[in-house]
Amino acid sequence: MTTPILDEAYDRLRHTGPERFGWLSNHAPMAVECLIRHGHGDDVHRWLDGYADRLEERPRGIDPITADEWRDPLGDPVRTGDWLDHFERELAGEPWRDVLARWWPRLLPGIAAGATHGVIRVGHAVRALLDAETAPRVTELGHGLAYWAARWQPLAAPGAGRYPSTDPRSALDAVPRVPDQRHGIRARLAQLADLPGWPAAAGAVPGDPAGPVPERLAAVVDAAVVRFGGHGYAEPVMLVHAATAPNAVLRTLPALPAALWAPSLAAAWAATAAVTAAYAPADARPAPVPRAGTGVHDLVDRAAAGGDPHAIKFVDTAIDTHGRSGGTAVLAVADRAIDDITG
């Protein structure tokens, strides 16, 4: 995807912060990448105009982060401006793949950062960079890495071992739910440390341990997409991340050294399991019925017309799943997701 519209959009957003009101994510860079990729480039600047009131200025730095003193400010949102400055300096001096490879294993244990929006933003930036290496795309990667670092949030330590089922959908069905689902994601994820069954559910990645990592990770994404059809009604905006977070990791694999693939799979599965534990309802509703004549382009058009960034990003991920599975079942899930998310 070499269209200049994406670089124009990134330039419009480069002086904005990764959040607003101190905790809500800036979805604009991710949404515009999806819109352009799926043929809605002509809508991007108008979409950004409508999103403008949800953007805040880029935060200023407080104290520079040095190459050997990065651990203390990790996970400190007050230092967001410092992290933005830090990655701007690093990416100005080295190839983006080298910076990514150095920071990926440092950030991976905190994959829950910003309700997983840190890794998701990085995944969209990497996908754009793999299409074309341009200065605005490198800048956007730096913003994604900075957001991830500033909101770095480790999950409760998982266990280890082989999952008793090789089916990711069965594995997701077996994930225990946190007992108190009244508050935000940080409060919910904090309960994982005391949740019986969490180490067993999160620590052993489903699938054949000898199988290729990209295929195993794609199966996790596909299971989360399909499962949304029955369970997304409870917390649709949050449960989309059970699919979009591992898909961001999957999209990043081609830019990473192969030695980082296995830990990436483990972290992606833990993120999917954590979002499921935090937000999935106890009971599933019937699977959605495909709407006659609905195709991929219809779903993209619906999501683009509605304008909701979570709907846009979920449809983007569901299209990947549909490309692997075919048929109408996944399209029906995406169709229902648009309704659930936009209300």
Image (cartoon, helix red, strand yellow):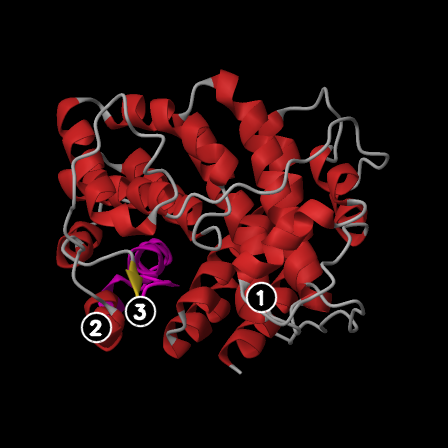
Range covered by the magenta-colored residues: 21-43
Which label lies toward us, 2 or 1? 2
- Which percent across, then down, holds residue 4? 16, 50
Residue 93 placement, left or right of 127: left
* Residue position marked by numbered label 2 in the rendering: 52
* Residue position marked by numbered label 1 in the rendering: 334
Q: Alpha carbon of mark 1 to alpha carbon of mark 3: how far?
A: 30 Å
Looking at the picture, which amino acid does disc 3 mark?
A: Phe
Residue 325 magenta-highlighted: no
Which label lies toward us, 2 or 3? 3
- Which percent across, then down, holds residue 75? 39, 43
User: Which element carries disc 2, helix, strand or loop?
Assistant: helix
Confirm or deny contact between disc 1 and disc 3 (CB under 8 A): no
- Which percent across, then down, holds residue 68? 27, 21
Seen as rendered, the residue at the extreme right is: 164
The local crowd at label 2, few if under 14, some if 14 to 19, many if 20 or more residues have their Cα within 10 Å, is few
First reached walking from the N terminus: tag 1 or tag 3: 3
The local crowd at label 3, few if under 14, some if 14 to 19, many if 20 or more residues have their Cα within 10 Å, is few
* Residue position marked by numbered label 3 in the rendering: 21
Q: Quadrant of residue 289?
A: bottom right
Q: Alpha carbon of mark 2 to alpha carbon of mark 3: how far?
A: 14 Å
Q: In which quarter of the image is residue 181?
A: bottom right
